[in-house]
Amino acid sequence: MDNNNNKPCSSNKIIKTSDGCEIVLELSQNDPFFDKKKNLLHSMGFDIREQVQFHRSSCPDAIATILERILQIARIIHLDEVELYFGKVNDCSSFEYWSPRNEVEALNSVLSLINSYSSCERQKEMNFLQTLQDEVLKRIQEFTDKNKVESRIDRSCSCDKEKCLEKWGESNGVKTSLKIACVEGAGRGAIATKDLKVGDIALEIPVSIIISEEHVHKSDMYHILEKIDGITSETMLLLWSMKERHNCSSKFKIYFDTLPEEFKTESPEFSSQSPTLAGARLSFGVDAIMALDGTLLLEEIMQAKEHLRVQYDELVPPLCKNYPEVFLPELYTWEQFLWACELWYSNSMKVMFVDGKLRTCLIPIAGFLNHSLYPHIVHYGKVDSATNTLKFPLTRPSCFGEQCCLSYGNFSSSHLITFYGFMPQGDNPYDVIPLGLLFPSMNLESVLTHSQTCADIDVGDAYCIEGCPTSSWTSHMVRGTWFSNNHNIFYYGLPSPLLDYLRGARSPAPHAKTIEISNLENEIEVLKDLQSTFSSMMENLGDTDLVDSDDASWDVKLALEFKDLQRRIVSSILTSCAAGLNLVQDELSEL
């Protein structure tokens, strides 16, 4: 899971002044999108280092206005690649926020800044800072109320093993405000046992029960594995877990007992929405593979399975042959290997330990926290040096009885299916279709059909869009145009970087978005090119599959659900192209 621990260091701070204080917000020079964010800040009248003044006498309305200015800066600082690419660069002030994830990040960054202000200084500015804090919390609550999902517990589902795990955790120092339960439509999840506020610690796990490479080092197989050139700690852990799950005296026996015998098993309690149970979909059957024909996910899964099979054949049989007393052949079959891969793909987390090392780990109990597009917990995975525990703090409130969710990372549905075994509920803004950079001489249909990832073709500074603060992208992508709120001429709900690149490819002269014959004629060609390309892609996806969902297996259902999503994305692009052509032709007819 992507635990958001590798962000550039922030130099944001609050400085005391004679008449109040000032908040300093600065874009890190280490930000991977520094130049684009810098240009975007400049286009909105900000510098990369902004000092926002507050006065003790500021009234609540003035504080709210200043807070909005701070948030405009914080939103840009916290943009990720997808948000930056699809963002509306020419009219940034006309919409509420860039994305739900970005808004929560921006609000919590301001809240964290207030909380970091020294208590002695804060006492002197209590009224002002309290008003500012209250306004931030109010906005977080409004966001929570707007995106709240009702959780219904399935009482017919037994969680006896999970209750044993909870008791085991408590006896080993786990502190929690959550309980494991079966949630309708989500499988097993973590439910809040009381109302939790922003900043509350929902779960605290001692390092002593975190499964990491340390356990491999103490095992009888380490002296064998450490001599293998190029073997990673993750592979060692995978091999260790294959044996440890059958160890009756293992410290983690109760944890392993809560895991399914087969991740691919589908039953009412093994919901496809529950990554803890579903696992990675590396065990897709033939029918499911066939159902994915025409999608990029087909190639992604096939490559993943092929890679694992090669890894297994090169590593495991020789270990079993040469060291049968340690690597018992009956415990190291291909099926057991695939089980372990799916376990680690779907349940592991990256944890930063106090020694500064980032390790891949399994976290008992925490593994039951499901993923959500509107998570309660975003920042986790760094061991607290004072308590030697891993803490899971809330970035938005969670009510009693509500399912408390994590963000596994900003992943597309294809990634979540391949490595976690589920599709998220709701519209996922990271469901993008990556494209090779488009030159007129390239066959875009071929790129769309056969390329798994973005083709990074360096275009240098040969083409830069006039007035566009985020131009010069070296890779492009599309997503459902329903995410855009600008379907006007020159936009059409499509990503501006892609449109601008295609305009420049057809007409090298600097392009301005003005109603002129040459510009409009260029627009028509660009839209027709996109229309032709995505019409071909829709043909590759085929018609909607007529399959009886009651009789279909779990993997076929998931494959068809994903394919329907791909059709929906492509259909929205085709609709936007058609509407755009009508807009442009109407403008041309009036000239």
Image (tube, rainbow, N blue to C red):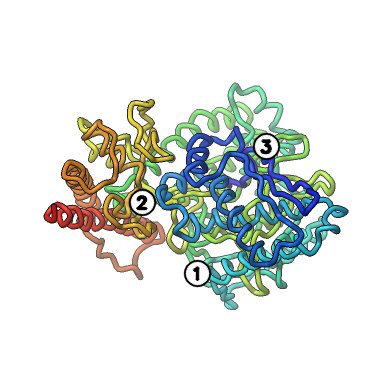
Q: Quadrant of residue 237?
A: top right
Earlier sequence position, callout 3 versus callout 1? 1
Per the rendering, the mark at residue 185 is: 1
Instruction: Say which residue label 2 marks.
Output: 479
Q: Element at badge 3? A: strand
Asked whether residue 90 appears in the rendered view, the answer is: yes
Residue shown at the point (72%, 49%) measured from the top left: 22
Crowd rating for badge 1 (residues with CA inside 10 Å; few <14, some 14–19, many 20+): some
**Distance between mark 1 and mark 2 Cα atoms:** 26 Å
Q: Element at badge 1? A: loop
Three-letter residue code for mark 1: Gly
Asked whether residue 238 appears in the rendered view, the answer is: no
Per the rendering, the mark at residue 358 is: 3
**Distance between mark 3 and mark 1 Cα atoms:** 33 Å
Which percent across, then down, holds residue 209? 76, 49
Three-letter residue code for mark 2: Arg
